[in-house]
Structure formats: C-alpha cells, structure tokens
Image (tube, helix red, strand yellow):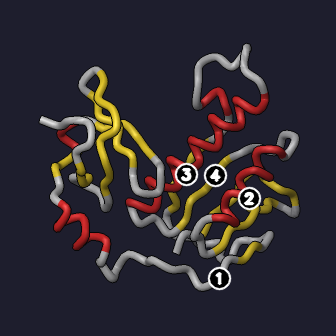
C-alpha cells in the first residue's frame, strides 16, 4: 500500500511526512523538520499535496515564536500533563560497551529530538527531558539544541534547591 516517497499523514495525530524506508512491515516517516519515527501501516494515511498544504495553513498550529528565554525555575508547580522521555542510555539501547561518548550523546540527542517531535505533534504544552546529573555534557547539548529551535521556554527543574537532572520545555 505505501511506498518510499509517499506523502502520509498520521491517522490519530497531527502532522505527517514522507515515507523514507519500509522494513518488516514497519514504515519510517521523515517529517519536514527532519525528525523520523517508525509506524505501523494502520497508523498512517496517504495524503495528497492539497491536504498537506491545508494542514500547514492551520491557524491552530503555531508557526512563529516571538522570543526564546531560559530560566532556572519552573513557571508553575501545577503543570499540565507533560510528554516525558528518559534519555538514560540503558533505556534507549541494549548495549553501549563499544560506543564512544560522542556516539552515546548522538543516540540520546536523537531520542530527545524524536520526543520533541512527538510532543509537538500531540500538542503537549510541556516536554520533560530526563538527562540525569552526570557530567553535564548531555544537558549542555540539549540546551544548545533547544536554543536553536522554536520553543517558548526551557529550564532545569529544581528539587529542594538542587538540580534534578530534568530539563522541562514549554512548547507553546
């Protein structure tokens, strides 16, 4: 039914993209933001250009963020439900023994970018990136990336005055 190059929309979510790979009955969809994920065929619908253009012009989808700021404290203790991803390596891959630190961070950053795309598509207001305390390299990479994309705000979640190893992103 689907083939590489087909434009698709997500059946139960906002957004879509282009089929870039098909393997073992799963379909890899790459979005316009260069994020991708695997889907089952029943989670996708073929889309024509007209439908995608109509979706792109949807006024309920923010297209511009006025400013980007960084703060070290959450804005509210009673946040709405957040999309959450644990970026600890053991949650992402089975074995990292022969990997360089750079390769590990790339895997973790890709997981964060995929989580961001999913949270954005599902219109979550908040995204929690659990990076841990560690050396701070992953946190630093995440914050550098967050400064380069369109998010309203991001900050470290503090617990009793201590950093918790979690960065919360206010999406819109």
Which one is earlier in the sequence, the residue at label 4 or at label 1?
1
Q: Residue at x 31, y 61 (%)?
A: 14
For mark 4, does the 10 Å Cα neighbourhood hold few (<14), some (14 to 19), or many (20 or more) residues?
many
Q: Residue at x 43, y 44 (%)?
A: 36
Which one is earlier in the sequence, the residue at label 1 or at label 3?
1
| Residue position for label 3 | 84
For mark 2, does the 10 Å Cα neighbourhood hold few (<14), some (14 to 19), or many (20 or more) residues?
some
Does the CB distance between marks 3 and 2 fall below 8 Å?
no
Does the CB distance between marks 1 and 2 fall below 8 Å?
no
Distance between the alpha carbons at the discs numbered 1 and 3? 24 Å
Q: In the displayed structure, does residue 117 sit left or right of residue 93?
A: left
| Residue position for label 4 | 129
* Residue 27 locus on image (x, y percent): 29, 34
For mark 3, does the 10 Å Cα neighbourhood hold few (<14), some (14 to 19), or many (20 or more) residues?
some
Which one is earlier in the sequence, the residue at label 1 or at label 2?
1
Distance between the alpha carbons at the discs numbered 3 and 4? 6 Å
* Residue 134 locus on image (x, y percent): 84, 40
Distance between the alpha carbons at the discs numbered 3 and 2? 16 Å
Please, what secondary structure does the residue beneath circle 3 have?
A: strand
Q: Residue furthest bottom?
A: 66
Nearer the observer, 16 or 156: 16
Please, what secondary structure does the residue beneath circle 4 have?
A: strand
Q: Nearer the viewer, mark 4 or mark 1?
A: 1
Please, what secondary structure does the residue beneath circle 2 have?
A: helix
| Residue position for label 2 | 143
| Residue position for label 1 | 67
């Amino acid at each position: 039914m689907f083939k590489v190059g087909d434009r698709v929309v997500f059946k139960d979510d906002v957004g879509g993209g282009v089929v870039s790979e098909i393997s073992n009955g799963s379909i890899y969809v790459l979005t316009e933001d260069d994020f991708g994920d695997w889907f089952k065929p029943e989670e996708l619908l073929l889309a024509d250009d007209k439908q995608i253009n109509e979706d792109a012009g949807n006024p309920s989808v923010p297209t511009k963020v006025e400013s980007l700021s960084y703060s070290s404290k959450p804005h509210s203790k009673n946040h709405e439900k957040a999309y959450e991803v644990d970026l600890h390596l053991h949650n992402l891959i089975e074995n990292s023994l022969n990997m360089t630190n750079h390769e590990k961070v790339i895997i973790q950053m890709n997981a964060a970018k995929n989580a961001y795309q999913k949270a954005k598509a599902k219109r979550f207001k908040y995204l929690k990136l659990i990076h841990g305390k560690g050396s701070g390299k992953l946190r630093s990479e995440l914050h550098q990336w967050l400064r380069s994309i369109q998010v309203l705000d991001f900050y470290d979640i503090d617990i009793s005055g201590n950093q918790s190893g979690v960065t919360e992103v206010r999406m819109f």
